[in-house]
Image (tube, grey):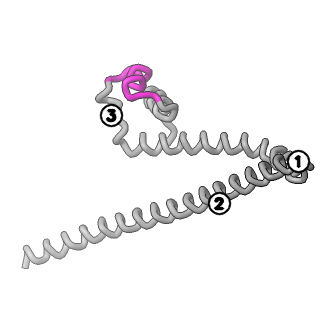
């Protein structure tokens, strides 16, 4: 759900890293209203969506630069100056390692979130089943 009105202002302020007081002033609401709305699942989803969109935009901008950066580093790897060559190699290896770790972490986190959501659904289904059994016991 895309936020509108002062909810959009609230979401933008939170995503921008503003304090809750600043967000309240920007949105024209009280601090307690901001705190309450930050518990709303729709607002939480809007914040996650906005952060995700910002990350995608940033990644898109980096992707545009990545090819030329890699090309430049590839040239520097073969530089006659050993110090420059080793520095370029180090940068490439370091960046590759961090990128691999980030992707691995993201996949693991997504899998864990899926497990938690599935477990929460099982608990919800289990509670309802338990209530049905209790209701039958009460009637019998």
Furthest residue to the right? 80
Q: Mark 2 or mark 3, which is nearer the start of the sequence?
A: 3
Per the image, the residue denoted by label 2 is 100
Q: Residue at x 10, y 77 (%)?
A: 137
Q: Quadrant of residue 132?
A: bottom left
Q: Residue at x 47, y 27 (%)?
A: 9
Furthest residue to the bottom? 140
- Figure check: 90 above or below 35: below
> Is residue 106 highlighted in magenta?
no
Magenta stretch: give its range.
18-30
Label 2 Cα crowd, 10 Å radius (few <14 / some 14-19 / many 20+)? few
Q: Regarding mark 2 in the picture, which secondary structure is present there?
A: helix
- Residue 134 appears at what percent x and percent y? 14, 73
Question: Could you tell me how far apart the alpha carbons at marks 1 and 3 are, in whole angstroms?
Answer: 57 Å
Per the picture, the main secondary structure of the magenta-coloured stretch is helix
Label 1 Cα crowd, 10 Å radius (few <14 / some 14-19 / many 20+)? few
Per the image, the residue denoted by label 1 is 81
- Residue 127 appears at what percent x and percent y? 24, 68
- Residue 51 appears at what percent x and percent y? 54, 41
Between 67 and 2, which is closer to the camera in this rendering?
Answer: 67
Q: Mark 1 or mark 2, which is nearer the start of the sequence?
A: 1
Question: Could you tell me how far apart the alpha carbons at marks 2 and 1 are, in whole angstroms?
Answer: 29 Å
Q: Residue at x 78, y 46 (%)?
A: 66
Q: Residue at x 30, y 67 (%)?
A: 123
Per the image, the residue denoted by label 3 is 35
Q: How many marks?
A: 3
Left or right of 134: which side holds 90?
Answer: right
> Is residue 22 highlighted in magenta?
yes
């Amino acid at each position: 759900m895309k936020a509108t009105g002062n909810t959009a202002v609230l979401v933008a302020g939170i995503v921008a890293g503003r304090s809750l007081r600043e967000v309240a002033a920007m949105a024209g609401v009280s601090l307690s209203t901001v705190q309450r709305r930050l518990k709303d699942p729709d607002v939480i989803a809007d914040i996650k969506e906005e952060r995700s969109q910002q990350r995608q935009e940033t990644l898109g901008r980096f992707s545009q630069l990545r090819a030329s950066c890699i090309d430049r580093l590839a040239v520097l790897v073969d530089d006659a100056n050993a110090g420059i060559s080793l520095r370029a190699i180090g940068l490439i290896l370091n960046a590759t390692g961090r990128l691999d770790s980030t992707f691995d972490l993201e996949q693991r986190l997504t899998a864990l979130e899926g497990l938690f959501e599935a477990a929460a659904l099982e608990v919800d289904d289990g509670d309802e089943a338990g209530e049905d059994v209790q209701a039958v016991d009460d009637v019998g």
